[in-house]
Every structure is written in structure tokens, then in C-alpha cells.
Image: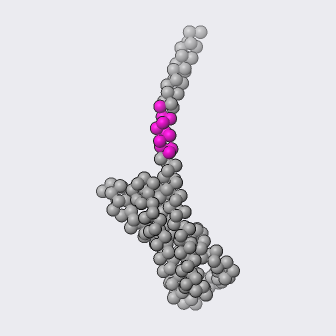
Amino acid sequence: MDLVALVDHYGYFAVFIGSLLEGETILLLAGIAAHSGYLSLGGVIALSFCGGTIGDQVLFQLGRRYGRALLIRSPGLALRAAPVDRLIQRHQMGLIIGVRFMYGLRLVGPFAIGMSDVSTARFALLNMLGAALWAPLVVGVGYLFGRALSWLIDDLGRYEVIALAGVVALAIMVYLARRRSRRN
């Protein structure tokens, strides 16, 4: 099975699963595939939004249900969680919306927020807002990268003849210069 067939067959599934987890790489590649016409840009953004929202909601609920028990069993983890809890209390809205953009916190962040006193409804609303910003932004960067890549390849094809002519002209000039220097 070639790459195009794999993208055609599993592309949307990979986008959804990738966005459930730390899916930036998958979403960037899906944006490139959307630019190339292998996937629908709107479909990729919609699946990314859904997967990102659902994944973070599940992690939030896991933190709500099992987080405190985990902290009780691990006092060292509880010490490290205290400053995070204070951060959640002070910057709740920005943290919930932006946690998916913070390297290394994409999976841990919603779990930790679930251990706080943030309501499920508030988290769900802000989580969807964050996903609504994240999905088109990351997929859009991939799409624009695909566009820039196609421009570069097209430009290379256009300038290839000029570059080849320049190399030939340079080779002729070097040949003539050597021939002239041998005569003298």
C-alpha cells in the first residue's frame, strides 16, 4: 500500500486519534495533506477540534476521579502539585484555554486541572474554546507550510533552467579563461 492510499484510508482516523493525544505533529502533517488535496481542510479542523476536546475532557475527569488518591499515595508528587494548584487558582481561564499550547502540559495539564476546584462545566466551556483556537491554528500552520513547500518546488522548477544556463555559462567562461591562459 502506498502513502497516498494510507492517507486516503486512515488519514481522518489518524487525525482524530492524534488530536486525542499530543497531536501537533499529526495535525501539521494533516494540514500539509489538506493542502495537497488528500484530506479536507474543514474535516481535519473539525476532527482535530473534536479529538482535542474529548481527550482533554477525559483527562480532566480522570484527574477529578483519581488525582487526589494519587497525590495521597505520592507525597513527593503532592509537593510538586501545590504550586500548580495555586497557578490554576490565579490564572484559571488562561491556563485552561492555553494548556494545549504549552509544551509538555498537553496531557498532564487537564489531569491536574481536574484535581482543582474548577467546575466540570467551566472546564468544558473553556476547553472547547481552547480547542477552537488550537485546531485551526495548528492545522493552518501545516496547510501554509504545504503551500510554501509547493511554491518552493514550483520556483525550483522555474529557476532550474536559469540555474542550469548559469552553470553552463560559468563552465564556458572557465574553459575560455583556461584556454586563453594556456596561450599566454
Of 58 and 151, nearer the camera is 151
Q: Residue 172, percent across and down? A: 51, 20
Question: Which residue appears farthest toward the front when viewing the image?
Answer: 42
Q: Which corner quadrant holds the N terminus?
A: bottom left
Q: Residue furthest left?
A: 1
Residue 29 part of the magenta segment: no
Query: In the rendering, at what x and y percent does residue 171 appear?
Result: 51, 23
Question: Number of numbered discs present?
Answer: 0
Q: Main secondary structure of the magenta part?
A: helix
Region rendered in magenta: 151-161
Coloring applied to the structure? one colour
Comparing 88 with 124, the one in front is: 124
- Examine the rendered structure and indicate whether residue 86 appears above or below residue 140: below
Question: Residue drawn 51% across and 53% down?
Answer: 145
Classify 110 as above or below 177.
below
Residue 113 horizontal/vertical position (percent): 58, 81
Q: Is residue 36 visible?
A: yes
For the C terminus, the quadrant is top right
Q: Position of residue 144 (x, y in %)?
A: 52, 54
Which residue is depicted at the point 62% across and 75% down?
95
The answer to whether residue 105 shows anywhere in this view is no
Left or right of 9 in this view: 118: right
Q: Quadrant of residue 116?
A: bottom right
Residue drawn 43% across the image and 64% down it: 43
Which residue is at 56% across, 72% downward? 130
